Amino acid sequence: MNLLTNPLLTDLYQLTMLQGYVDKGMHEEAVFEFYVRSLPGTRGFLLAAGLETLLTFLEGMRFSGEELKYLAGTGRFSQNLLDYLAKFRFRGDVFAIPEGTVFFENEPIIRVVAPLPEAQLVETRLINILHFEILIASKAARCVLAANDRAILVDFGLRRAHGAEAGLLAARAAYIAGFASTSTVLAEPLFGIPISGTMAHSYVEAHEDEVEAFLNFAYANPNNATLLIDTYDVHKGAQKAVEAAIRLKERGIKVRAVRLDSGDLLTLSRDVRQILDRGGFKDMRIFASGNLDEYIIHDLVSQEAPIDGFGVGTKLDTSEDAPYLECAYKLMEYAGQPRFKKSQGKATIPGRKQVFRQLEGKTMVGDIITVEGDEAGGIPLLTKVMSGGQRTTRRQDLKDIASYARSQLQSLPAHFRELKTKPPYPVKISPVLSSLRKEVVR
Amino acid sequence: MNLLTNPLLTDLYQLTMLQGYVDKGMHEEAVFEFYVRSLPGTRGFLLAAGLETLLTFLEGMRFSGEELKYLAGTGRFSQNLLDYLAKFRFRGDVFAIPEGTVFFENEPIIRVVAPLPEAQLVETRLINILHFEILIASKAARCVLAANDRAILVDFGLRRAHGAEAGLLAARAAYIAGFASTSTVLAEPLFGIPISGTMAHSYVEAHEDEVEAFLNFAYANPNNATLLIDTYDVHKGAQKAVEAAIRLKERGIKVRAVRLDSGDLLTLSRDVRQILDRGGFKDMRIFASGNLDEYIIHDLVSQEAPIDGFGVGTKLDTSEDAPYLECAYKLMEYAGQPRFKKSQGKATIPGRKQVFRQLEGKTMVGDIITVEGDEAGGIPLLTKVMSGGQRTTRRQDLKDIASYARSQLQSLPAHFRELKTKPPYPVKISPVLSSLRKEVVR
């Protein structure tokens, strides 16, 4: 079984509900929207990501013989549902806010319009993909803002990401947000993301001597040698890196950087900078890692620590301070009628919606959520990206998405660019949408 | 490319280090151990999980032509490394603490003994698998202790898990810890975990009337009908569930349960219990969901809320209050010599280690970490599970692992069973191991 594209990556209730829909012939057009109900306290904005991943999933979703056989064997489903699933293709329309766009609470960033069973069946994996990529892109964007163009950022998170797919999608989301590269090798052939890396403590430990380890590593990797200097003692390690670099220079090999992975990075980076400079290696860079996040990066950059790059791992790939989003994929219309739920704390705003963004100069000043077709003013964010199950636009290059995201971050109100989360960005519900809501609830 | 078994699911530095090892012929025996440096503040113990997933990965790890072609094309590697990778099989020995075992900080739970490049190359994915399954099994164990056998637990987390693999492995880890089932369909054919589910709000909304929605769902799923009653108003919803159940009873269909997904679950469950009882459905169960975790479950169970089952999703699958563990996979010996690092805050204890557990009656009272071969007293926890790259034991049934985990949780000191995390469980370093450490550091 192919795991990541498997249509059984779903909640059982999607299939039991489909049994009901198919039995009753409930195939009228349904409109679902995906949005985030409220932002985590530490987030002033979110960054859209995951759309390409989602469209690829929607285009490829199929039930193979193996899966149909399993479903038949459970005894839970009737033949009419199995027949429906055997022919299943997603043939709906999708409207979306582009990847890399800044967005806020209650703003629909995906709208799916399809016969009810189709729009329902894709729910679980749709949320699974969008939730995670948005989560990581939004965390990564904060790291990028903290680095403030004064250091490059590299994703180091695969080992402590929640499973393999999380590691891969985190590399993708971080790159969209402005990370320079990832240490995850598979992200290069899969997504075209540049990869980079250093060396581990075990490499140093396996050698009898630190200088020998540095030399051997650089001989083996003459174009990409970054030396890890904190295995035993950072100051001695830096001195040994200079020693090795002198010998390597004679052989025409340039050591690119040293890495610090522990201790007080501000003090140590200053000391190491001095040692490297005095050794004659002013262009040897200093790279830092070790449970970093946007707060630590912000502190180090503000204090002008001489660090040229940060490896951000665990706290990025798990979005440590906000490991989930209050997101939802909700039915907004069925068979031409707006639909809603009013569950306590989770009520929906019915109808097909559009988001308009208003700018002053290049700065975002406010969004309006309204019903589709109402020209509320500003730039409409949702556009059609899939029609009848087929992409209407070509696949976007990840570099272009990253470049667009960069311009989005630059257009944020200044306090968000400084990692502050308050005051919240003004998002208004239009009068037309308010009226619709009141009318439907009545 | 097959994603989840792909050998490129690794950090670039594993491959650049291997280039160094292969160039220098550093193929001597290496010993690596995986352990957790310190427990998150909210965890008094951890539960071992992920071993079977790991062994399957180790047995199957291969570089295909496609991956070798990619690596050659990067221009980063020499032919000798590409030749080595083309023939790569993991042929090492693995020692492990069984899945489902309670463990604590600094206790090695996996020891890998293999030629240095083999033991090194598996690092990233080994950590990725073990870290996540332990993380979720440990969180799930706390939910199980909170439910205290008075309610069943179901994993609902796929949609907000960090990617597809996280959802699947979370279902596995939660089942090991004592969850009854999962809503993730693929977990049944893949792992043999029972699946269960209810219905979504969209199902109710898509019908003109709540009773009609309940009836249609139960007709379509006569053996498994759980009705969601909080879409508009819980009290009216419960009344309508009774109405539907009466009509269904006439057709021989029994409604198993109702589900609450919002609001004050204590008050609402009591009200709903009354409504169901008065309607003549004393055996209709009440199921609750909605951002639950062990703390909320503990409160509800302690107050004797009439809730028969809890669906635990987001906060389980993301381990929300502790989304990562300070785990490490470190070189402890190479070419017959103990190895160590002394990086600040991350120093290792060198040598091959064993953990002994001491019991009083059936209760765990203390662990001793010592060097392999030293009979410190108690039950040794690490045993050989793989020899020369082949499993030495048959695949364990997940049910048996779950049953063993249950006995482990019962043997915990009482305060851990009550979700308290202090005092910490006593884990001692043996005199022999202390001496070795001092000697090696000297």
Image: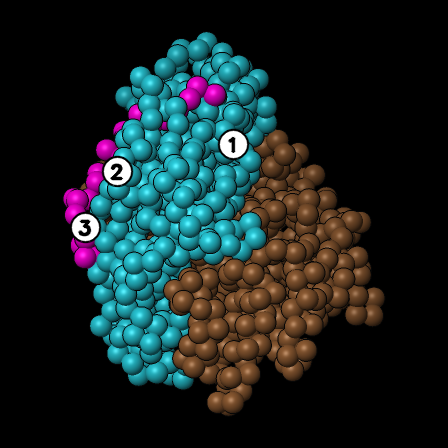
Chain colours: A cyan, B brown
Give the amino acid at mark 3.
Answer: Arg
User: SS class of the residue under badge 1?
Assistant: loop
The reply to whether discs 2 and 1 touch (Cβ–Cβ < 8 Å) is no
User: SS class of the residue under badge 3?
Assistant: strand
Q: Nearer the viewer, residue B235 or A113?
A: B235
Q: CA distance from mark 1 to mark 3?
A: 38 Å
Q: Nearer the viewer, residue A427 or B351?
A: A427
Q: Does mark 3 fall on the same chain as mark 1?
A: yes
The residue pinned by badge 2 equals: A398
Within 10 Å of the Cα at label 2, are there few (<14), some (14-19), or many (20+) other Cα atoms?
some
Q: Which residues are magenta?
A: A387-415
Give the amino acid at mark 2.
Answer: Leu
B194 drawn magenta: no
Numbered label attached to residue A391: 3
Residue B62, x across and y down, in percent: 32, 59
Give the amino acid at mark 1.
Answer: Leu
Q: CA distance from mark 2 to mark 1?
A: 25 Å
The residue pinned by badge 1 equals: A292
